Image: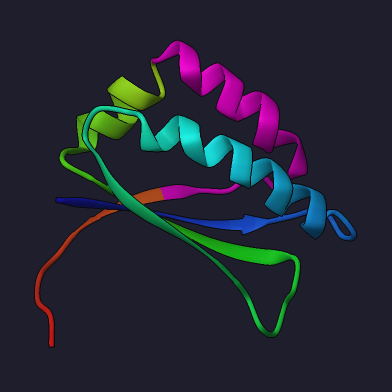
């Protein structure tokens, strides 16, 4: 399993619109092969900052399958204009749990 992590800095005053758009976009990513689940969390101290965690079967399911899909263009249209700056996305493989 691969964990995708992105800190999303949403333009000030657009949090409600972002959350509404994310509700629509969520259906897109949930339908992708290799998708396992996601969480979107809002920062308590910085209300315009969100943490997106997405679980994928493999790195390629995200980087090739999702990002290379026609559906990704709709995801981009719905969400990418909210970010400033554009987020860095990183991928993690679990080492241990407690």
> Could you say where residue 45 lies in the image, as x and y percent from the top left?
70, 85
- Does the segment drawn in magenta span residue 85? yes
Q: Residue furthest top?
A: 70
Residue lying at 57% horizontally and 28% vertically, measured from the top left = 75
The quadrant of the image that shows the C terminus is bottom left
- Magenta region, residue range: 69-89
Name the residue nearer the viewer: 27 or 61.
27
The type of colouring in the image is rainbow
- Does the segment drawn in magenta span residue 8? no
Whether 94 is drawn above or below 66: the answer is below
Query: Relative to 30, is 35 on the left or the right?
Result: left
Whether 50 is drawn above or below 56: the answer is below
Query: Relative to 1, is 35 on the left or the right?
Result: right
Residue lying at 61% horizontally and 64% vertically, measured from the top left = 50
Q: What type of secondary structure mainly makes up the magenta span?
A: helix
> Could you say where residue 79 lies in the image, as x and y percent from the top left?
67, 37
> Could you say where residue 1 lies in the image, as x and y percent from the top left?
14, 51
Residue lying at 72% horizontally and 48% vertically, measured from the top left = 20
Name the residue nearer the viewer: 18 or 84.
18
Q: Residue furthest right?
A: 13
Whether 6 is drawn above or below 34: the answer is below
Whether 19 is drawn above or below 44: the answer is above
Query: Relative to 13, is 31 on the left or the right?
Result: left
Q: Residue furthest left?
A: 96
> Could you say where residue 71 lies in the image, as x and y percent from the top left?
48, 18
Query: Relative to 74, is 77 on the left or the right?
Result: right
């Amino acid at each position: 399993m691969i964990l995708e992590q992105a800190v999303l800095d949403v333009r000030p005053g657009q949090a409600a619109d972002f959350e509404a758009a994310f509700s629509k976009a969520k259906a897109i990513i949930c339908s992708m092969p290799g998708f396992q689940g996601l969480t979107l969390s809002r920062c308590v101290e910085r209300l315009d900052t969100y943490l997106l965690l997405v679980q994928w079967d493999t790195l390629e399911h995200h980087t090739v399958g999702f990002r290379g899909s026609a559906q990704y263009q709709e995801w981009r249209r719905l969400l990418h204009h909210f970010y400033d700056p554009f987020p860095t996305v990183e991928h993690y493989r679990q080492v241990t749990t407690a």
